[in-house]
Amino acid sequence: MSAVRGWLMTDIPTKNPKIKSSQAKRRQTGSYAVVLRIPSRRKIMIGKLGLVDFPRGHYIYFGSALGGLHARVARHLSQEKKLHWHADYLSAEIPWEYAWQLADGQRWECEWAQSAAAVAEDFDGVSQPAPGFGSSDCGCPSHLVRVNNAKQVREILSSLRPAPRRLRLRF
Ligand SMILES: [Zn+2]
């Protein structure tokens, strides 16, 4: 399957509705990272994980949506939702601010989370303060990675391979 990379379904300039619809479907699947900042230390109930102590910092959560990437990212960035994933419990307290994504039809969340954690371990402070966050089904230590500042977030997200791109759209 050829990888179709991009951000938005509406990016595709075509007058053929059939092509548009099949390309749009492929572009709807892939992986993403959403980012938020916790300005001061905070304890938050994260579903079955229980009460988690989050140090001040910038947090990156990695996920994938093989059945609707655009809708999933929009859902994360929305405050109108039922609490389902660990990420929902966190963002009910502090909203995700923006997203990066790669709509290539593949699931990169585990590789990205592990490679991000490896980079974050070299920074000061705890890099994975919520063990098991978002990784109940895969066995990764966590899909949530903490760093100290926005520069480190960019450094990590731009080091990922294959590379996601920042979404310009605000929901
Ligand atoms: Zn994983």
Image: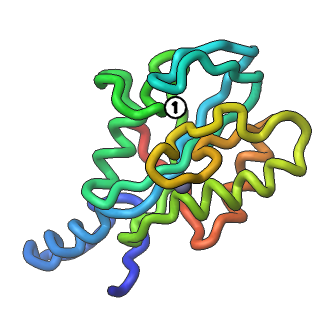
Q: Which residue type does callout 1 highlight?
A: Trp
Q: Is residue 167 above or below residue 131?
A: below
Q: Is residue 162 visible?
A: yes
Identify the residue shown where x is 44% and y is 65%: 107
The secondary structure type at the circle numbered 1 is loop
Identify the residue shown where x is 32% and y is 51%: 70
Identify the residue shown where x is 17% and y is 72%: 20
Instruction: State yes or no: Cβ of the residue under disc 1 lies below 8 Å from any atom of ligand 1.
Output: no
Q: Nearer the viewer, residue 117 or 56?
A: 117
* Residue 1 spot, x, y in % from top left: 33, 86
Q: Nearer the viewer, residue 62 or 99?
A: 62
* Residue 165 spot, x, y in % from top left: 55, 60
* Residue 150 spot, x, y in % from top left: 74, 40
Q: Quadrant of residue 36?
A: top right
123 lies left or right of 141? right
Identify the residue shown where x is 53% and y is 42%: 34
Q: Mark 1, residues whose alpha carbon is within 10 Å: few (<14), some, or many (≥20)?
A: many
137 lies left or right of 18? right
155 lies left or right of 106? right
Q: Is residue 40 above or below residue 141?
A: above
Residue under pointer 1: 96
Ligand 1: give its quadrant.
Answer: bottom right
Q: Is residue 163 above or below residue 94?
A: below
* Residue 56 spot, x, y in % from top left: 76, 22
Q: Is residue 119 above or below residue 108?
A: above
Q: Is residue 167 visible?
A: no
